[in-house]
Amino acid sequence: MLLAVQLPDVTDDEFASSLGELGRLAKTLGLDVVARVTQRRSRLATSAVVGEGKLAELARWTGGTGVVPTGPPIPRRRADRESAQEDEPETAAEPQAAAEGAGEAIPPEQRASVVLIDHDVTPSQARNLERATGAEVLDRTAVILAIFQRHARSREARLQVEIARLNYMAPRLRETGGGKDRQGGGIGGRGAGESSIELDRRKLRDRVAELRSELASIERDSSTRRKRREQQNTVALVGYTNAGKSSWMRALTGSGVLVQDKLFATLDTTVRALQPETVPRILVSDTVGFIKKLPHDLVASFRSTLDEARDADLLLHLVDAADPAFPAQIEVTLDVLREIGASDATRLLVLNKIDRVDAPARAQLAAAWPDAIQVSAKDPADVERMRERIRAFFERDTIETELLVPYARQRVVGEAHSVCRVLEERHDEHGTRLRLRARPEVIERLRHASEGR
């Protein structure tokens, strides 16, 4: 069940695109969308996101009362006792009638058990919706977190997602039936005057601190590996989720990364060498996909993973050219790149999935985005063209020169073969003469090493 409010600053196309994206998120979670409830409002309703009429329509699909009960929630044990009383149907009859008045009753087997909201809502709004609909309510952030939690495979990714999930849960902890009872103080006590919900929040904060400490240890190892790659040519695939980054990772490197037509199918960063291997090697990294309203806690948690994009020499910015909403997706990606400090990196816009676009639309794309490259990961010719474009980028600043390496410093010859293109190698009485093509700073470093400086 999808619920969305169209605000004044959102166009009809943007609203339809966002709602369609929420439907794909639901599909990724394994949910079937049975209905969509939308409303135009100047702002979200303070109590339950939508107005009374739409709330009743929503409740018709979920089997709820359609009315937000007044007063605090009834404790679970007391609610169970009251539900057994004979006068219970009479107290619920009036709200149920209001819900049925919104339209034809929905058979129980067709009712929705989960409501997905295309907005970030407050804990009280979510709680009121649950009480009015009788269904589980997830806002946009909760949906994305659930998908991330399901797809995280590496230890680092699982820690990152868990930290973001706990930070999201902290303000949403609810009182249970005995939640307001105070814990007694004294020796061995848990703190004088501390309620159970305060205790839960303290435990949650302690758990987050523990996870952050473990994540920091893993991030130090990742940072060390990145530093080792500083002298190598690096390319990072970035873009909106499901833009085809993993497909291109597999096409360019031959790696067996997961490729699925789902949002956020890949969360773990993979680094592989461009195939066939070049000299020097070009490393390609796949990164987590972006999405509109990506939770800030997730951006913060995945910052070390996104550093692969910040430190790369070249960003391949992939977009799904067949998606009508891709211009807005480009802006979302640029916003995230700015947030992680990668906005100044050299970027090549790649209009992917061009095989799904007809000829007139391709001409329009070429006119609107003249610097972009139109390709499809399914076309071997396009894959080879992309490889050539990457190789040409790293050769644009290279120069050709000759280097004399004394026989006493032959280790420099091995290093030259790994970081430069060696055009010619000769030996004479003075040492090994190499004719090289590489970037000026690389050649200067090798020259200093051959001279013992």
Image (cartoon, rainbow, N blue to C red):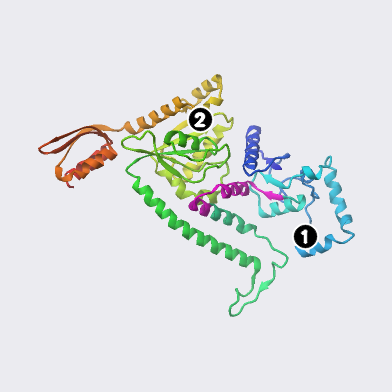
Q: CA distance from mark 2 to mark 1?
A: 54 Å
Looking at the rendered structure, the secondary structure element under dot 2 is strand
Q: Residue furthest left?
A: 429
**Is-magenta flag for residue 151?**
yes
Which residue is nearer to you in this view: 195 or 208?
208
Q: Earlier in the sequence, mark 2 or mark 1?
A: 1
Which residue in the structure is indicated by mark 1? 71
Q: Nearer the viewer, residue 147 or 240?
A: 147
Highlighted magenta segment, given as a residue range: 136-160
Foreground mark, 2 or 1? Answer: 2
> Would you name the residue on which mark 2 appears?
352
What is the count of numbered marks?
A: 2
Callout 1: SS = loop
Whether residue 129 is situated above or below residue 427 in the rendered picture: below
- Determine crowd level at label 1: few under 14, some 14-19, many 20+ residues with C-alpha closer than 10 A: few
Q: Residue at x 56, y 24 (%)?
A: 357
Instruction: Give the vertical position of 98 relative to 194 (above or below).
Output: above
Residue type highlighted by circle 2:
Asn
At horizontal 64% and vertical 36% (from top left) the residue drawn is 20
Side of 359 where 396 appears, left or right: left
